[in-house]
Structure formats: structure tokens, C-alpha cells
Image (cartoon, helix red, strand yellow):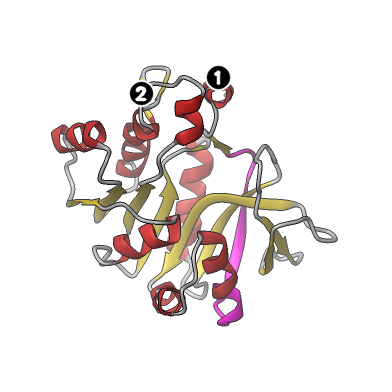
Amino acid sequence: MDFAIIAAGEGSRLIQEGVKWPKPLVRLDGITLIDRLIHVFLQHNPTSINIIINEEMREVREHLEKADIPVPFHLVVKSTPSSMHSFYELSKVIKSNKFCLTTVDTIFKEKEFEDYIRTFEKTNELDGLMAVTDYIDDEKPLYVQTDRDFFIHQFSDSPEKACMYISGGIYCLQRSAFKVLEKAMSEGVSRMRNFQRMLISEGLQLKAYPFSKIIDVDHAEDILKAEAFLKIH
């Protein structure tokens, strides 16, 4: 399975709040966000690791070019208007039939991630297994409506009836998703949440996989929240 990281955002809110590092190099207990994800991915026998950063991230580029990554590694350097566009650039280097994509600031328990990856590796009937959580600490969460068997029926910007979960920013997908991605690009669609809606409207079969908590590091205070969360066993 290939693994991929979207790390092309500017992290403007962190900068405004006095954080001096670009988001991928923000440290949790001394470990950068980008290095933490690479370490986690390497525990799962990746066929490749693929990362996109924007053209202004010179420090991040230098950091990654010096990194010792013992599997095929592709670094895409390109500024994009949205995370969906970043995903499109990554799709050009992802070669495996199954892959896991995440944003650089997703903080989760490694054991839960391990179980998530194993579940997706064992299934062939799903087009995607999407990480979700009922922990809501996001300014603009994407709500995920599922049935009792966790099959996803809708993504929405506001909570619908019986909607327990929000998207966690971690996506395990089959290559069937690329066809939808190409269509989204050709139709001028933007944002990952709209791409996810298209996956449903195009008939792909998606299932939700609940994590106890996933934290996004968007604000300076989130750094302390994430460090405290990771210390809980």
C-alpha cells in the first residue's frame, strides 16, 4: 500500500498566533508532524511514501530532502488552491491499487491507525474506508452520515439527523477514486469535502471507520491538546 501526505497548506492561523515553524515542522514533544507521520507509515510496510508541499516551504523541502526514508519516496513541490488539487498532484505518483492519504496535521492513536490499515488491507469490496470521529473540535467540520453498518450515505456541512461523526482527514481508497478525482478536476470542483460528496454521487462504496479521537493542529492551542492526547495510554 502507498501512503501519501498533503502538507501544502500555508498554516496561516498558526503563523498569526506566533508559531514560527511551517505546519509540517511544528513539533509535538520534539517530533515534527511530518516526521511523526512518516514514522507511523513505516510501521506498515509501505510500497512508497508520497508528500506534497507548497513552493514556499523551503525549510520543509530541505528537511525532507535530508530525511532517511528507506522506501521509494516522492516529494511533490507545487502550490495548489485546495487540498483536493494537492491530492490530484499526488495521484500522479501513487501507483498501488490501495493507498492511504492524510493531511499533515492529523493526530491519532497509533494503535487505532494500525487497526484501521489492517481492516482496509483485508477488504476488497470497498472503494474507500474513511476515518471518522465523534470528537468535534473543528471550526468547519464535515459531518458524515452512516447507516448502522457504517456505510456512508452523505457528507454535509451541518449535522443531519442521527449524524454522529465528522471526517477525520484520513482516507484509505482504491484506485477507483482516481476516476472520480479526474471528473472533479474537469468540472472545476474544489475542496476535499466536495470530492468526497462526488464519491457518493458517483456510486462508490464507502464505509466509515470510527477513531476515538482525531485532533487537527490548526491553532497554537492545538499543539498542547495534541501532546496531552498522545500521552494518554
Q: Residue at 52% across / 50% down in the picture?
A: 169
- Marks 1 and 2, how far apart at CA: 13 Å
Q: Residue at 76% across / 52% down in the picture?
A: 164
User: Where residue 183 appears, x then y in whole percent?
Assistant: 44, 80
Residue type, numbered disc 2: Ile
Q: Which residue is mark 1?
A: 224
Nearer-N-terminus badge (1/2) = 2
Frontmost residue, 29 versus 64 = 64
What label sits on residue 44 in the rendered view?
none
Element class at badge 2:
strand
Residue type, numbered disc 1: Leu
User: Where residue 104 appears, x then y in whole percent?
Assistant: 41, 41
Quadrant showing the C terminus = top right
Judge the density around disc 2: few (<14), some (14-19), many (≥20) Cα neighbours within 10 Å. Answer: few
Quadrant showing the N terminus = bottom left
Q: How many circles with numbers are drawn on the protein?
A: 2
**Mark 1 or 2: the one toward you:** 1
Element class at badge 1:
helix
Q: Which residue is mark 2?
A: 31
Reply above or below: 168 against 16: below
| Magenta range | 199-214
Reply above or below: 141 against 85: above
Q: Is 140 contained in the magenta span?
A: no
Reply above or below: 51 against 32: below
Frontmost residue, 148 versus 24 = 24
Image position of 90 (left or right of 135) = left
User: Where residue 155 appears, x then y in whole percent?
Assistant: 66, 64
